Structure formats: C-alpha cells, structure tokens
Image (cartoon, rainbow, N blue to C red):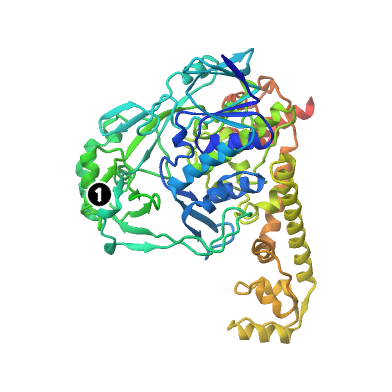
C-alpha cells in the first residue's frame, strides 16, 4: 500500500504546522505526520510567544503568510507591549497563550485547510534514490511518496526524558520517542548531535497564596503580532510575580547532589538563555532573589506554569524547592519538571533554503536544526514549507539575507556559526536591528510576500498602499514649514524647555523626543491612517539619521553578498587560507563571499585571499 503527495511534513509542532500550511496554501498536495493528533500545536514548555528577536520573527512570517501571529492574537490570555521606554529596535510584544485553545484551534485549522491531510503515524525511514528524496516509510509499513520531505521532529529523535536519576525513552513527558529515523538519517550521510532542553513543574492554582505575589496584567489594546488582527479588546488575565528566597538557595545547594547536571546523567548542553534553577545556583551561588512568574496555562485549567524554576531534579527535591518560595509554601505539583535529550542535525548541512546539501528535496526545520523556541521553529517551518513547495513547482527558492529580516539572521546564523547550545534568536545577533524592527515587517517584506504568493492580492495591494502612504506622508511633513513663533508656543504648551531660534520643518519638530505624530495635527491636516502606518511615519522621521547609517552598512553588506562562489567550488585550490577556514568552507559550501565571511573560523585575511583567487580565475 502506498500514496503520492507533493510535500510530506514530519512533525506536528510549530515548525511542522507552518511548513504544512505554507505548502498547502501554495496548492501543493500535502500530508502532515504526527505521533498524536491530539498534541498538534502543543506548547511543550512555556505558554508564551514573543520577546526580543522572537516577536520580530513572528511579525515577519505573518506578513509573508504565516499563521502563528494571527493565532496567538486570537487565543491568548494576555498580550503586553514591552520596552516602550526604550528605542524602537527594542520594542516588542509578548503573548501568553491559552495553551488548550491554541492547540485545539490550530488542529481545527489544519483539518479545514484545503490540500492538507493529517495522519497519526510514526515515520521511521526515508526513501532515498541516488541522493534524491522519494518519500517515507512509517511504523505501520506504509510507503508515502513525494517530491519533497520536511523533517520537523522537535525533541523526539531518540528522545530521553530525565528526572533525577531516572532516564527513559520519550520525546516529551507521556509520549513515545522516535528511535529508527535517526539511523535512517545517519545511513544517508546526515551527521547528528545531541542537545537537551528542560521544563519546570506545573502546580495547582488552588494551592497558591496569591496575596504574597504581585499580579501583572495584560493590555486591553496591545500592539498585536499580526498586521491583519482587528480586535476591540484583548484579555488581561494576570500572571503573578514572586521570587526565590535565601532559603530556596540553601535548599537547592543541599539538594544539588541529586541534580542530573551534577551527577552526570545529563551530559548534553541545554539553552544558555533558559537555565535551570540548579544551574543558576551553580553559576551564581551568591544570588538569592531570582524572579518566578506564575502563568496560567488555560482558562479551562488550574495548571500554573512556574516560569523561572526549570529543573530536572528528582520529585522530592522539586517539592522542597517550591515550598521555600513566598506564596508557594502549600503548593501542590500537578506535573513534575523534567529534561529531555534528543538528536539534532547541525544546520551547516543545509542551504539557506533549509534544503539538505546531501539529499535533494529533503528539508529540515525547527529543533532538529539545533534551535530552541516556538518562534524559531515556526519561522524555519514556514521557510522550509515555502521552499519545498517551490521545489515541486520547479521554482527557485526564496532566500532571506541578514539585512532583510530576523528570518535571514536566524537561518544565516544556524548554518554558519557553531554554538555549544541550542540557538535562540536575540537582537544582539543582528547588525541591523534598527532596520529590522518588530513594527515594520510590511515595509521590508512586502515584495517577498508577493513573490511567495500566499497572501491574497487584495491584502498585498492594501499594504502597498500603506507603504506608499508612509513615504508620501514623510515627504509632506518634511516640506511643511512651522514658524519660530508657532513652534515655540507649541513647545511651551507641551511643557517643554526647548526653544527654537528660527522656523523649522514639521519633521524637525517631530524629532524632539516628546513630540508625537498626532501633535503635528496642530500644523497640518493629518489623514486617517491605520495605527501601524502612523507608527512608521513617526519612527522613520525620529530615527532618520540612524536608519540612514544602517542603510549605508547594508549596501556594503549587499556588495559582498553579490560576489558569487560557484556551487561545487574547490576550496582546496585556494592557496594561503588557514586550515580552519578551509575546513569550515568545505563543510558549509558558501555561495557568496559574504556568506563565506560569516563562517566560524574564517578571518578577514582568508576572505582577501579567496577574493584574489576568484578574481584571478
């Protein structure tokens, strides 16, 4: 028994979801395999989406036709716009999902999507012919054939759950691991490594003393992730803030001998930016007031996620640690925290399209690429889904460079930069973070969205009009003159001490920190633009000098990216580059000088020698 599809997606997490939706929405006959239909879209760890860098990814794939932004806008407990006192590059949204609704509604969406089928079965083997993917074989012995396969397997490849001194096969607590697919990958030349991640305990809301904690509410009118979201009001369900105490640290120190990190049961590396409490105590023994956030998992549940208390310590240790925290003295654990170790395939084996360099038509997305985070997974899934679909249509892949979006930063980093732990996107990883803001995805990526073809023509035309209005209004504001008298009277009425000695343009007034776009209504008639358009006008004028400086840097970057290295280039033929650089280039197989310059171990001298060699040829 066998079946034919255009694209096969393996895995029903955030990467698999975006991959399957993108492929199906591009009219490819698509099938998604999952170990459990009930766990599609499961948020295995924290209930949040967004944060520095992560919000940017969600907003970017939203403009391109992804689903995560719209979904979290609909099915959340609270949304909050963060870092509002900082510059525009730092301002982002964080959402706390209703995990039950998020998962169930995502499953319903997949079931309703045209061109998409969902099958509960375990993929155990790849069908490969002469280094070309042909399909997959499942645990039930069924063969499914396709022109492209996307692996989005999360933490399930040879997954091992660890709690204290207990270790057993599982990809997630209560779910089986996938044991045979790793062998199939290795037999076909794919290198694998091991990483681990961990999650905190969940406790019963009814056993918490909230009077000892600070409630933190969401916003009724937040800045949404999706540019397409229209809501009159958003929910404001609180999270609660408490802290560890000196007693917590004392208890944890006494129990460290039971930590699988200390005992050596866990030998692999986990996400550096989300350390367990036992690792925090090991690394910062003098600090005692670590923040602990209690986050409700769903309106339909009493489970609270204990954000900040990630641990794989044994159950009795988790109980003692929890009860030492203010407000949790009588708390009851519903699910114990645990770690999971799993196989991943280093992304240096991929092209920027996320297609394998070793097996044509095979794509990798999400944690299998050595990343962490729902947002990073969803982004990779979307890119893999788009490019797998285009592969079956004999179209060139859509590639994003570092100057176009955090999408480009993420993909470029995981391919070229080796990290000792699961990769997480951060603003500090981007050279152009003022350009790649959370709020301006539609300004940057509209042409790419049109090229991909998922977003409707009506929406594309609407956003094109919005983009044109931004530039038109900026020019109008620059050309509008305000007399010295008018300007100083306005500044005085706003309570500002600034005084001008001559007339200025309205744009110069707007560059004053306390002046807003709406304030300019005093001097010129303001059109009825959407908020996201008004925001762009204000930010682009206020930060014009810095944005222009980044634009010049981007132009220099683009020049290096345009110097092509032919596919299959013999790096052994280049005399004078270091052995480290040569090994890195042979592994990654860069397709441009810019790409080569970002490979770990490659120096400026190596690039100069490579450039001279290319020009000589």
Relative to 205, 194 lies left or right: right
When the figure is inspected, residue 495 is found, relative to residue 38, above or below; the finding is below
Residue 446 screen position, x and y as percent: 72, 49
Residue 114 screen position, x and y as percent: 64, 36
**Under tag 1, what secondary structure?**
helix
For residue 489, which quarter of the picture?
A: bottom right
When the figure is inspected, residue 331 is found, relative to residue 257, above or below; the finding is below
The residue at the far front in this view is: 112
**Residue picked out by circle 1:** 322
Q: Residue at the spot x=68%, y=23% of the render?
A: 574
Residue 381 screen position, x and y as percent: 58, 36
Nearest to the observer: residue 247 or residue 120: 120
Q: Residue at the spot x=73%, y=62% of the render?
A: 470
Dot 1 crowding, Cα within 10 Å, few <14, some 14–19, many 20+: many
Q: Residue at the spot x=74%, y=44% of the render?
A: 450
For residue 545, which quarter of the picture?
A: bottom right
Tally the numbered discs.
1
Q: Quadrant of the C terminus?
A: top right
The residue at the far top in this view is: 130
Residue 565 screen position, x and y as percent: 72, 29
Specify whether residue 447 is in view. Answer: yes
Specify whether residue 597 is in view. Answer: no
Nearest to the observer: residue 172 or residue 410: 172
Relative to 568, 236 lies left or right: left
Nearest to the observer: residue 401 or residue 587: 401
Q: Quadrant of the N terminus?
A: top right
When the figure is inspected, residue 76 is found, relative to residue 524, above or below; the finding is above
When the figure is inspected, residue 81 is found, relative to residue 379, above or below; the finding is below
């Amino acid at each position: 028994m066998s079946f034919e599809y255009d694209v096969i997606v393996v895995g029903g997490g955030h990467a698999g979801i975006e991959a399957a939706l993108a492929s199906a929405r591009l009219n490819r006959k698509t099938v998604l395999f999952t170990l459990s239909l009930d766990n599609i879209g499961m948020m295995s760890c924290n209930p949040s989406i967004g944060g520095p860098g992560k919000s940017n990814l969600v907003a970017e794939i939203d403009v391109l036709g992804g689903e995560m932004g719209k979904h979290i806008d609909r099915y959340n407990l609270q949304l909050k716009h963060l870092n509002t006192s900082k510059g525009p590059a730092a301002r982002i949204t964080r959402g706390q999902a209703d995990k039950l609704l998020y998962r169930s509604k995502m499953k319903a969406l997949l079931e309703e999507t045209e061109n998409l089928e969902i099958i509960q079965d375990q993929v155990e083997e790849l069908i490969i012919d002469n280094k070309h993917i042909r399909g997959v074989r499942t645990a039930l012995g069924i063969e499914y054939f396709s022109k492209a396969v996307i692996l989005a397997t999360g933490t399930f490849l040879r997954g091992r759950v660890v709690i204290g001194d207990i270790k057993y096969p599982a990809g997630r607590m209560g779910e089986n691991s996938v044991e045979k697919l790793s062998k199939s990958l290795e037999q076909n030349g794919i290198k694998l490594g091991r990483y681990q991640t961990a999650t905190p305990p969940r406790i019963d809301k009814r056993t918490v003393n909230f009077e000892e904690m600070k409630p933190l509410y969401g916003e009724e009118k937040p800045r949404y992730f999706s540019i397409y979201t229209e809501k009159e009001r958003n929910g404001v369900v609180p999270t609660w803030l408490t802290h560890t105490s000196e007693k917590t640290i004392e208890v944890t120190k006494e129990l460290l001998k039971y930590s699988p990190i200390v005992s050596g049961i866990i030998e692999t590396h986990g996400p550096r930016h989300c350390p367990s409490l036992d690792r925090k105590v090991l690394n910062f023994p003098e600090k005692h007031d670590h923040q602990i956030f209690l986050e409700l998992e769903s309106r339909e549940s009493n489970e609270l996620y204990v954000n900040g208390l990630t641990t794989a310590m044994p159950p009795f240790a988790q109980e003692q640690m929890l009860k030492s925290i203010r407000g949790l003295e009588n708390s009851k654990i519903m699910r114990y925290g645990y770690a999971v170790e799993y196989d991943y395939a280093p992304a240096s084996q991929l092209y920027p399209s996320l297609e394998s360099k070793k097996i044509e038509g095979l794509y990798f997305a999400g944690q299998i690429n050595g990343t962490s985070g729902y947002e990073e997974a969803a982004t990779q899934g979307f890119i893999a889904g788009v490019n797998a679909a285009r592969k079956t249509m004999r179209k060139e892949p859509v590639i994003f460079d570092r100057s176009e979006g955090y999408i480009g930063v993420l993909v470029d980093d995981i391919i070229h930069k080796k990290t000792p732990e699961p990769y997480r996107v951060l603003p500090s990883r981007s050279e152009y973070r003022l350009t790649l803001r959370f709020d301006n995805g539609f300004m940057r990526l509209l042409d790419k969205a049109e090229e991909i073809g998922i977003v409707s023509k009506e929406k594309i035309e609407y956003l094109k009009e919005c983009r044109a209005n931004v530039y038109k209004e900026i020019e109008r504001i620059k050309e509008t003159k305000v007399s010295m008298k008018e300007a100083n009277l306005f500044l005085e009425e706003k309570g500002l001490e600034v005084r001008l000695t001559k007339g200025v343009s309205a744009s110069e007034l707007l560059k004053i920190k306390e002046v807003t776009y709406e304030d300019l209504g005093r001097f010129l008639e303001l059109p009825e633009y959407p908020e996201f358009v008004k925001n762009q006008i204000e930010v682009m004028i206020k930060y014009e000098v810095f944005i222009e400086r980044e634009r010049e840097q981007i132009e220099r970057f683009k020049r290096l990216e345009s110097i092509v290295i032919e596919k299959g280039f013999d790096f052994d033929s280049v005399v004078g580059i270091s052995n480290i650089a040569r090994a890195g280039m042979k592994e990654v197989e860069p397709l441009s000088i810019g790409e080569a310059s970002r490979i770990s171990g490659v120096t400026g001298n190596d690039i100069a020698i490579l450039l001279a060699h290319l020009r000589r040829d």
